[in-house]
Structure formats: structure tokens, C-alpha cells
Image (tube, rainbow, N blue to C red):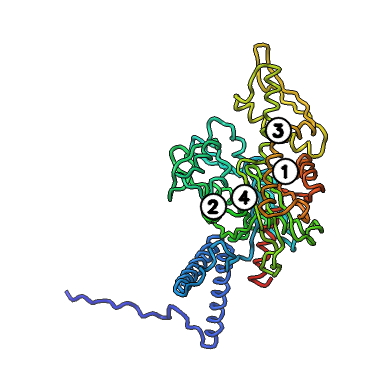
Amino acid sequence: MLRIRRQPPLLRGRGFRATPPSQIGPLIAGLGAAAVIYGTSLLLKAARNPKFQEAMRDGAAKTADAARSAAASSASRRGADAPPSPSSPSTYFTTDAMGLDVGQGYKEWSSASVAIVEGGEARVVESEQGGRSTPSLVAFLESGETLVGWPAKKLVFSRTATPVHALHLLFGVRHASEACGALASQLPYALTEGAGGLAAVDVHGAAHLPSELAGRVIAKLKQSAESAAGRRGILSAVAGVRPRAAEAEREALLAAGAYAGLELQLVDEPVLALLDAAGELPALREARRVGVYIWGGRSFSFSVLARGAGGGEAELEWEVAESRWAPFLGSEGIDEAIVRHMAQDFRARHGIDLERDHLALQRLHDAAETAKAELCSSFSTQINLPFISASLDGPLHLNLSLSRQALAQLIEPLLERTLGEVDAALAAAALSPAELDAVLLVGASARAPAVFDALQRHFGRPPLRTSRPEDNIAKGAALRAHQLHSAQFGA
């Protein structure tokens, strides 16, 4: 049979319509404009992304490191001085910067704080808990969870957590050194050998470098500053460091900043304090030689500062002529003196040692902080701690009145030790107390009347202090960061 193969029907119309040539140009232009707008929006979003900014910072840092290496090699061949260390003013500064006081302990008077500059004025940024400071404290739970700042403070005397504070004392300390042995006898946590032979904190068998732990605190401060800056990423900061700090100590603080994603510039704490205080205290603007008394939470320093030849846009006006530093001679000793006083009074009345009860000890320290602050503005305070303990006869309460005069007597030995460091610094500088134009009190301990009175007796004139002496270092650091930003960007 003959089969006829059918052909498909012819298409009666085309499947597409050609665009007239007169319309092709505008269409392509419109698509191009849309692509440009979309691409620009993506770039703007990326530029506001902290990870993008960090990548840019890392690229700039690598370029700067390469330049420093080349300069060092060239200088070595010429026999010239080495280029500035990485702690010198950086050539990269973001459009948003902040100032840091990394703090020394977990008490409110020794906590860390952060400041930014708005409208030419420095201000301390509140934490997410609403406070003006963040305890410089990291607590490790048995579950493996880690708490930082205020949540960790509740666990300082817990038996199920490992609280770690006074981290600045461990910066740059080698585990095999005598200094590490001395610190181990004073700190409430175990030390072990970390990377590079440095002293580290032993937590559940793991070694944590102090720079890592301090970096967690700095990251909290950075988060608060970024929130205050409109959620913009901050990559650069100025931080205070004690005068005459060893290079290893400075490197540890720089590493803590890097852990938090920050490129730090370090400036001596008394210089930063003067930078802030001069805006409020006219007497400092005319002074040529100033003593700066900083009674931190876990250490004390007294420095003699001289006005230098600086004062330019990116230059510091003051320089440290002499300084003395004493670890473990801190203002947290005020709290400890009050706690001992309360515990001794309770033991005399009831025969029970509250310092052996970790729950009672937490309440004693909280009460000591409150009483210390109240006695800055009142002549006496009442301490009431109900149900602090119990006996066979029932619950026991602590009721105690503490006067400002009694507190001054309790801390007199501590104050005398700080004045000994003051005299040693003056002797090293070949100066008498009368040769200082002014003495500035820095830190929250400057609020204590006993501190003010002791310095007034020692120098024969009242010392100076700002309305918020606890903010001096952080605000001074923010002002310095603003100076560097202005010098770099001309803003």
C-alpha cells in the first residue's frame, strides 16, 4: 500500500514580533540605567556591612604592613631608625571611631566604658542594659556557655562558674616568669601556659589568652558604640594604656582589639584624661606640669605630665615625664574593706562568718558598692541585708550604720600606700609637690571624699576633678579618635 507522508501545516504567523529600530535605543538605555541603580544599591549596602568594611580594613592593613616592611628593610640598609611600631598612629581610620577605657574589674567603679563624638562633643555610650559602663569580666559556665559584662557579674561568687577579671594584669606576661607566679597567688582563677609561652587562663582544661577574653569585653563595647552611631560599622578606636607599659603588654591590648574587629591606637591613660578634663577645667589649660592620680579597680598609677611642643591637629599636647604603677593597689580595696567590716560586725554579734558563704558574700559586695556610692553624697548610710543567714533560733539579718568618717578610717592604709607611690613618682621626676601646677583625680574613686581630702592634705591645695571623673579616659580617647579622623579626612 502506498503511504502518503503528510507535511506539517505552514505557520501562518511568526512567533515573535521584531522591535522597531527606533525603539531599541531607549530600551537598552533603560535596562542599563536599571542595572546601574541596582548595582549601586548593592554597593551601598555592602559598604554599610561591617564584614565588607573589615575586608577593606584588612586589605589596607596588609598594604600598610608591606609598606612598613619595605621601609624597615630600607632603613636597615641605611642604618637608620626603624619605622614606627604598629601602635603608632594608623594611616587608616574609618569615618566612625570610638574611644575605649578597657576597665580593670567587675565593680561599677572599675568597669569598662566606650565613648563617641557627636557634634564635636564626646559622650559615653550606654550599654544594652542601660548602664554607662560594662564590667570587664567574662564568666564561663559548666554548660560551656560564656557570659560577658553585666550578666557575668552575677556569677562572681558562684560555685558553678569560672569568673575571669583583672585581665589587664596578665597582658604580655610570660607563664614561666616570676611575675606570673606572683599574679597566680593573687588571682581567683588558675593560670596555664598559652600560645607563645604567654600566661593564659585555665578554664575547664582549655587555655584562654587574656587578649582573647578582653576582646570579648571590647566587642560588647563596640556593639554599643555602633548602635549609638546609627548601626554603622566601627573599625578603629583609641584605647587607654598605662604609661610605660612594656611592648608585650601593648601588643596584647592590640590583639584584644583585633579580636573584636578593631584597629587600635594606644595612648597613655593620663594623657587621654587630661585631653577630656581640659575642656571642663580652665585651670588645666594654663598648666605646664600636672600630676594625674588614677586609682583604678585593680591597680594604681600616678603620673607627672608636662606640656610638650605638640598641639597640632594630629599631635598630642601632653607627654608623660614620670610615672609609677602599682598592681593590686586598686580601689576595689574600698569595697573589700567595707565587706570585712560588715562580716566582722556580724561575726561578733552572731558567731557566723559570712565570708565563707558564697551567696552571702555576693550580697555583702553588692551592699558595699551601694554604701560606697551613697557616702560620696551623704555623711552616713544604713546597710540592711535581711535573711543574710540563719541559726537554730531562726533567720538572721544584717543591720549596720556606716559613716563617711568610719569609711575614711577603714581605707586609710590603702590611701597611704597610694600617696607613697605619688611621692616616689615626684622624687623620680626631681619635683616637689609645690612644683606641680595642678593635680587631677581620674576615675570613679575620685568621687570618694576620703580620696579628695587625702590629696588636699598631701599637696596643701584641693585637687581637680571633673563632674564625671569615671568618664575621663573613654571621653579623652574618643576626642583623640576624632582628632585622628579629622586629620585624615579633613572633616
User: What residue is shown with label 4?
Assistant: 102
Q: Observer-nearest residue: 20 or 64?
A: 64
Q: CA distance from mark 2 to mark 3?
A: 32 Å
Q: Does 277 sit above or below residue 170?
A: below
Q: Observer-nearest residue: 409 or 160?
A: 409
Image quadrant holding the N terminus, namely bottom left
Task: Give whichever of discs 1 and 3 has the lower sequence position.
Answer: 3
Name the secondary structure under disc 2.
Answer: helix
Circle 1 packing at 10 Å, graded few (<14), some (14-19), many (20+), is many
Name the secondary structure under disc 4.
Answer: loop
Q: Observer-nearest residue: 233 or 439?
A: 439
Image quadrant holding the C terminus, namely bottom right
Task: Find the residue positioned furthest to the left.
Answer: 1
Task: Tell me the kind of residue under disc 4.
Answer: Val
Q: Give yes or no for contact between labels 2 and 3 (Cβ–Cβ under 8 Å).
A: no
Foreground mark, 2 or 4? 2
Foreground mark, 2 or 3? 2
User: What residue is shown with label 2?
Assistant: 249
Task: Give whichever of discs 2 and 1 has the lower sequence position.
Answer: 2
Q: Give yes or no for contact between labels 4 and 3 (Cβ–Cβ under 8 Å).
A: no
Q: Give yes or no for contact between labels 2 and 4 (Cβ–Cβ under 8 Å).
A: no
Residue 363, picture quadrant: top right
Task: Tell me the kind of residue under disc 2.
Answer: Glu
Kindly identify which numbered label has been placed on residue 368.
3
Q: Position of residue 78 (x, y in %)?
A: 47, 75
Task: Tell me the kind of residue under disc 1.
Answer: Ser
Task: Tell me the kind of residue under disc 3.
Answer: Ala
Res. 308 visible in picture: yes
Circle 2 packing at 10 Å, graded few (<14), some (14-19), many (20+), is many
Kindly identify which numbered label has been placed on residue 445.
1
Name the secondary structure under disc 1.
Answer: helix
Q: CA distance from mark 2 to mark 4?
A: 13 Å
